[in-house]
Image (cartoon, rainbow, N blue to C red):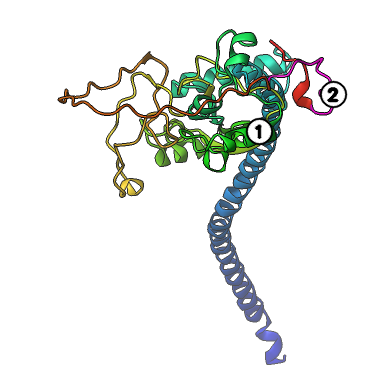
Amino acid sequence: MSPCLLSFPAVVRHGAHTLSHTARLNKAGNRRQGGAGMIEFSIVAVPILLLGLGSIETAHWLLTRQVVSLALLEASRAGVSGHARPETITAAFEQALLPLFPASASNSARQNQQLAFHKRTRDTAGAPWQMAVLSPTTAAFNDFSDPQLSRTLQGGLAVINNNYLLEQDQRRRAQGWLHGLGPESNMSIYQANTLTLRLTYLHEPVVPGMKGLMRLLGRSGGTYGQHAMAHGYLPLSREISLVMQSHPVRWPGLVAAGNVIQPGLPTLAGPAPILPCTGLWCMAPQSTTLAPGSPDAPYRPPGSVRAPPAEPATPTSPTAPLPGPADTSTDGLAVAPDHPDCGLTLCCAPVQG
């Protein structure tokens, strides 16, 4: 018998042993590859997840920014045609914001909006949004107020005449006002008839963890925007200027803790403790000599009116009286709607009370 036939069983046993050993090696290799794949997936998945969440937050922020910009435009249009009345500006702005708060099965869009505003007020102890009237300023009213309009149209409130601006500017230049600029405001009659609004809207992030990041960047007791960031909200700032189409009126009640404010007026003081600042964002020293009501002044939640600090008594000495402002009377420029010269411009439209 051939020797090759005698050794065949041994060859078969050796081949089976080799196959089983190879299978064990392959199984162990598959386990190692599976573990490496999980590690690689974890490394890649985290950046992809963060990128996806960031895209969602960015899209939501862009939508909010666009709606807020259009709402500011609607508010300013209502203001220039409605004597810059704060209630008119507020109503137009919140009406235009309704697309951000769609109706649900149980609530209307208006109810959802009020719930969201109430949540912002509860979280920040302040207004859910704030709009500063940068122009016309208090000094502009002092320079260009029309006494006749104040008596006949608005019950004694300061009113700037919106009729015949060119004639008013020429009259003041003839009175000696350099370039027609007011002595107190350093503004012209055209600038005094321009409504400028600066909006700060509190945007609430939708992605988990973003509010915590906002809290790290904010500062409690700082400006309105910093105070909101300390409570997890991102302030969106927008500004717009439109020429008035009605007589600007200095309305009472504009304070620095409401929705529509006038910078430079008394601020409302409340429980706003200045907390010690920690972290990398507090390296720069903070100024403590800012004027109340300025955009960088500390934000004061609603409360009582803060009394101005008492000034030290100083000996008085007789001084010459300061010259008063030039006569700002417009000598009948407050033209009635039925005047023959009317009908060509919007300034002759009847004034709404």
* Residues rendered magenta in the picture: 334-345
Q: Main secondary structure of the magenta part?
A: loop
Q: Is residue 22 left or right of residue 279?
A: right
Q: Secondary structure at mark 1?
A: helix
Q: How packed is label 2: few (under 14 Cα within 10 Å), some, or many (20 or more)?
A: few
- The residue drawn where x is 77% and y is 22% is 348
Residue bearing the label numbered 2 = 343
Q: Is residue 242 left or right of residue 348?
A: left
Q: Quadrant of residue 243?
A: top right
Residue bearing the label numbered 1 = 68
- Residue 27 percent location from the top left of the image: 59, 63
Q: Secondary structure at mark 2?
A: loop
- The residue drawn where x is 65% and y is 38% is 65
- Residue 175 percent location from the top left of the image: 55, 34
Quarter of the rendering occupied by the N terminus: bottom right
Q: How packed is label 1: few (under 14 Cα within 10 Å), some, or many (20 or more)?
A: many
- Of 257 and 47, the residue lying toward us: 257
Q: Amino acid at mark 2?
A: Gly
Distance CA(mark 2)–CA(mark 1): 35 Å
- Of 87 and 46, the residue lying toward us: 87
Q: Is residue 134 magenta?
A: no
Q: Amino acid at mark 1?
A: Val
Q: Is residue 64 left or right of residue 257?
A: right
Instruction: Determine whether label 2 and label 1 are within 8 Å by CB.
Output: no
